[in-house]
Image (cartoon, helix red, strand yellow):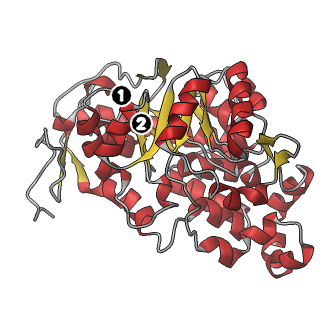
Amino acid sequence: MTPVNHAVSSPRVVNIEDLRVLAQRRLPKPVFDYLDGGAEAEFTLTENCRAFRDVFFRPRGAVGIVDCDLKTRVLGHELSFPAMLAPVGYSRLMHPGGEVAAARAAGLAGTGYILSTISGHKLEDVKAASRGPVWYQLYLLGGREAAEGALDRARRAGFSALVITVDTPVAGMRERDPRNGMKELLGPSLLAKIPYVPNILAHPGWLASFLLDGGVPKLENIVRPGKGSMELIDVATALSQAVVTWEDLRWIRGVWSGPIVVKGLLTGDDARRAADEGAAAVVVSNHGGRQLDSVSPSLRALPEVITAVNGQVEVLMDGGVRRGSDIVKAICLGARAVLIGRAYAYGLAAAGQSGVTRAIEILRCDVERTLRLLGCPSIRDLDRSYISSRNGWRSSKDTTCEEPSDTT
């Protein structure tokens, strides 16, 4: 078990926002804003969270629940509650434990972890750290040959599923990053870092751990033949040369024998196409509002995808989840489970593995309390009868999740 870290225990930390505040205090501005920010005007980033406020609960009264069952199954894996840890790039910049610490916390909590290609720790070490299911999220950085090498390593290490992210033909314009000197922080030029040094020096705890960890890590899982591991600074340029197409998905099916999850879909048409191409699951996602701004919040896109796939594949979602009640709302709308990203990354940045553990604990307790207050005994019993919504939310086959559009 993870030792209790009083810095993230109650009453100092009672919700995810408390972890966010601690992360902001510990991290220098370029690293925190990389984690916290979104694309352009951050409209979608804001709407991802706000969308949950448009969904209201319809609890059953006078229901006594002895045992509340939070378990669910995703791609054959039993999870302790319906949430997995999403892939978060640059995690080792947030805390030296990075992906290893997050995977270990997920496993101890009985849930799964998804490792980003943009990882500072070797995938073998991440898998070894977790007792739960671990999936690998693939970008075609470094080309197909580098990707084949990573997939072979992932298969041999025991990764049980492959996640293909399809919404990154280029990196989104995250306006906080150039203002804060994120590129300069990661780059080799000491002269370019000078304007940002005062802010970095104002966070001595982070700076000490960063330097003791060896500074900017390489991307240990993108090994290019004859060139070695990719430098972290190369990612933005490399993304524009690593677009994933449906043809690539067919190629990937030929080199990966396990389940494939397609992440980054917001329309029913794309979800059906993914199912037709052999995906076992899809993730309704707008990349946490970090790619194309002004797209639909993930929760609003979820009903269309659920209707489109019609049970052909499992449907997950991410984006804006900050409370266990958010998770319950997504399940009521048809998701099998959610992926949480910033919610646990704030914990990682604040206190390493113990911070991730605390984030998971908060969300899991929130989910159980919400179910008990709803009068619902288990996750599998949740459906749209437990919610209503405003602004005409519904799928083409279900009208129970709707109230008049002028409801306030």
Q: In this orientation, which residue lies closer to the viewer: 266 or 112?
A: 266
What residue is shown with label 2?
A: 282
> Is residue 215 at all visible to an observer of this figure?
yes
Q: Dot 1: what SS? A: loop
Distance of label 2 from label 1 (alpha carbons): 7 Å
Question: Considering only vertical position in the picture, is 71 above or below 224?
Answer: above
Disc on res. 313: 1
The residue sitting at 70% across, 44% down in the picture is 143
Determine the image quadrant of residue 59.
top left
Q: Are marks 2 and 1 in contact (CB under 8 Å)?
A: yes
The residue sitting at 37% across, 46% down in the picture is 326
Q: In this orientation, which residue lies closer to the viewer: 301 or 7?
A: 301
Kindly give the residue lying farthest to the bottom in the view shown: 195
Q: How many numbered dots are placed on residues in this image?
A: 2
Residue 152: x percent and y percent?
Answer: 71, 25
Q: In this orientation, which residue lies closer to the viewer: 148 or 329?
A: 148
Q: Amino acid at mark 1?
A: Val
Disc on res. 356: none
Sequence-wise, which precedes: disc 2 or disc 1? 2
Which quadrant holds the C terminus? Answer: bottom left
The residue sitting at 16% across, 36% down in the picture is 385
Residue 81: x percent and y percent?
Answer: 45, 29
Crowd rating for badge 2 (residues with CA inside 10 Å; few <14, some 14–19, many 20+): many
Image-based side of 25 in relation to 121, left or right: left
Kindly give the residue lying farthest to the left in the view shown: 404
Residue 308: x percent and y percent?
Answer: 25, 38
> Is residue 112 at all visible to an observer of this figure?
no
Q: Dot 2: what SS? A: strand
Q: Amino acid at mark 2?
A: Val
The residue sitting at 48% across, 24% down in the picture is 80
Which quadrant holds the N terminus? Answer: top right
